[in-house]
Image (spheres, helix red, strand yellow):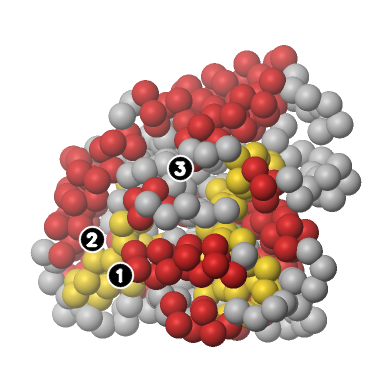
Amino acid sequence: MDFINHHLMNTYGRIPVVFDWGRGCMLKDTSGKEYLDCLAGLAVVSAGHANTEVAKAVCAQAEKLVHVSNLYWQEAGIKLAEKLCSMSGGKRFCFFGNSGAEANECAIKLARLWAGEGRFKIICAERSFHGRSLATLAATGQPAKWEGFDPLPSGFVHVPFNDLSAFTEAVDDETAAIMIEVIQGEGGVYPAQPEFLQGLRQLCTERNLALIFDEVQTGMGRTGKWWAFQTYGVEPDIFTTAKALANGLPIGACIASESFAAAFQPGNHGSTFGGGPVVCEAALATIGYLENGGYIKQVTQKSRLLTDGLKDIRHVVEVRGCGLILAAVLDIPLAAQVVEEAFHRGLILNAVTKDAIRFTPPLVISEQQLLKAQEIFRKAIRTVIR
Ligand SMILES: Cc1ncc(COP(=O)(O)O)c(C=O)c1O
């Protein structure tokens, strides 16, 4: 496989390996070498690689009907929207796109339409990540990622995460919404403090703002509940999810409470492929698999096992996160080198910052595999940090 003379745009610093097989938490490259995947494609394949139930659902739907315009109804989309709303509580409505960025674009447009003329500002957090489209990039609180793309859409304000006073002070007559990740993923795995989320909820209610939670990375059971906000008991007006929704097939959802969803009328928003029958059946199969297999319930126990094990490793000074989105923080900024060494040893992880290494394994990972991951990680650290 020639990846030296490829024709793909240079948007990723790819590791020189070609994967061609996956099953559960295991991946194989073209040389036959096996890897234990503790990243799950960045929190995507929660039900495991090449999940049979999802594959069956995709094949069955692909043989029946692949696409019909959103000018018409189809059963899978109706069923998935109903399921997602029942997982969220309250009366809510869904819009389906094809990615996390599109789900967030929808949330931003919906909030601005709901807020009405003159109210367009969205207050976001520093260090946040909301996507790569122009509006979601503008919402992203990482200035390095904006470079070269001016002018970005205006109206996005950034203040420090977990700083309720800063969010409160940033609100003015032009503010439409507050948008945050419940746990910042790409920024380094930083969970929101409970008082901060509760304070934002109160602030949004008092000032008539939309509270938007980006659950693209934290949703679909990764924290032990379907949505991370359920672990805090704080309800958003609008939230988004994507990554693990269809276990690797492209779909994103924006889910809004009735009074917010009502702002959209036909013609305000759309997507040709969004919520097509094949991806919706894949999502329904993913949800069914995670639910029936008891995997969401097991997250807390697996999280404890992983956290305790990681804390025991020399040079790990902190383990941040919740459920199965965790970062092991090193006492030396050698995260990239440790990840590379772990990779050579057959363990897939990722460095979110210079000193933090992210673990987002498939939720179906076994306790034995978690122990194996810790052992490889320990050896990788020992090799890199002497
Ligand atoms: C919290 C969050 N929001 C949005 C996105 C963008 O999702 P996508 O890459 O599917 O557009 C990501 C991707 O990492 C994310 O972690």
Q: Amino acid at mark 1?
A: Val
Q: Which residue is found at the position 57% from the left and 73% from the top?
A: 124
Classed neighbour count for the residue bearing mark 1: other residues with Cα under 10 Å, few (<14), some (14–19), many (≥20): many
Residue in the image at 37% along x and 23% along y:
292
Secondary structure beneath dot 1 equals: helix
Rendered position, 126 above or below 207: below
First of labels 1, 3 by sequence position: 3
Judging depth in this view, the residue of 174 and 321 nearest the camera is 174
| Separation of residues labelled 1 and 3 (CA atoms) | 29 Å
Q: Is mark 2 within 8 Å of ligand 1?
A: no
Q: Mark 1 sits on what residue?
A: 338
User: How far is mark 2 from mark 1, CA to CA?
Assistant: 8 Å
**Element at label 3:** loop
In three-dimensional space, the C-alpha distance between marks 3 and 2, rounded to whole angstroms, equals 26 Å
**Residue 254 showing in the rendered view:** yes
Mark 3, Cα crowd under 10 Å, few <14 / some 14-19 / many 20+, is many
Relative to 242, 188 lies left or right: left
Q: Which residue is mark 3?
A: 220
Q: Is residue 245 above or below residue 241?
A: above
Secondary structure category for the residue under label 2: helix
Nearer to us in this view, 139 or 248: 139
Kind of residue at disc 2: Phe
Residue hosting label 2: 377
Look at the image and tell me whether residue 252 can be seen. Answer: no
